[in-house]
Amino acid sequence: MKLLASLTSPFARKVRIVLQEKEIDCELVIDIPWNAETNVPQFNPLGKVPVLVLDDGQTLFDSRVIVEYLDTLLPSRAFIPHQPHALIAVKRQEALADGIADAAATIFIEKRRPESLQSQDWIQRQQQKINLGLEAMSVALGDEEFFVSERFTLADIATVCCLGYLDFRFAELNWRELYPNLARFMQRMMVRESIGSTIPVA
Ligand SMILES: N[C@@H](CCC(=O)N[C@@H](CS)C(=O)NCC(=O)O)C(=O)O
């Protein structure tokens, strides 16, 4: 099995954390989809990472499909609950975290265009998703240790990847001051080897 990923992608990080947590052997192939020499479109017609290439050559994308597949491999250490209410709560939190990360990545890409081509309306629209999304995230966590079912799940993994991406690309956002409960959550999560070892790097 091999994983095509960039070390900055919050979506690929979700997969890398699940692989480590489950101790699944998988070759990591660094491929930046924005580079001219990328091979990603050969494996994913959408040209995005992460992509998981199975031993029989089958390819899986996107990150939500990949983590769902990986979770079936070692059911004794599952990060997606089976109980329907908890399952949907985890998926909802993952969608929120991924959505914020997606809006942040969209702003980052827009700001790389020549200034005269950048749309401030578009940037503001994405910024609002981040602002409202973080607020919703903070409310969802409240004073709990974990997002769902009082245990470490994919909801926590996705949230870490989202907040870690904001730290990486938008350090000026200062979400920790606005949402101290999310700051405490992140601090608790950082002690996990799978999380500490996958912090985005340029
Ligand atoms: N929904 C997808 C999003 C993946 C995604 O947007 N990946 C970015 C890297 S962070 C990418 O490969 N972008 C290249 C492109 O959009 O062409 C997932 O969860 O895997």
Image: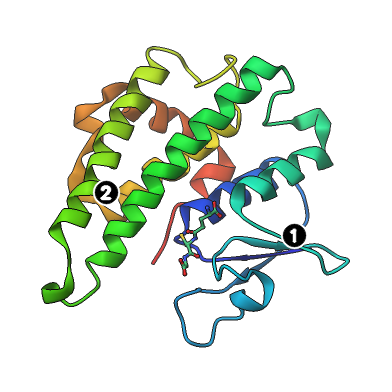
The answer to whether residue 183 is above or below residue 164 is: above
Residue 110 position in % (x across, y down): 26, 65
Residue at point 83%, 42% (across, down):
73
Q: Residue furthest bottom?
A: 37
How far apart in space, not on screen, are marks 2 and 1 (Cα)? 34 Å
Q: Label 1 belongs to which residue? A: 26
Residue at point 52%, 29% (across, down):
92
Q: Label 2 belongs to which residue? A: 126
Name the residue nearer the viewer: 151 or 93. Answer: 93
The secondary element bearing badge 2 is classed as helix
Sequence-wise first label, 2 or 1 = 1
Name the residue nearer the viewer: 154 or 113. Answer: 113
The answer to whether residue 6 is above or below residue 174 is: below
Residue at point 38%, 67% (across, down):
202
Residue 191 position in % (x across, y down): 50, 35
The answer to whether residue 127 is above or below residue 178 is: below
Tell me the kind of residue under disc 2. Gln
- Crowding at dot 1, Cα within 10 Å, few <14 / some 14-19 / many 20+, comes out as some
Residue 180 position in % (x across, y down): 27, 24
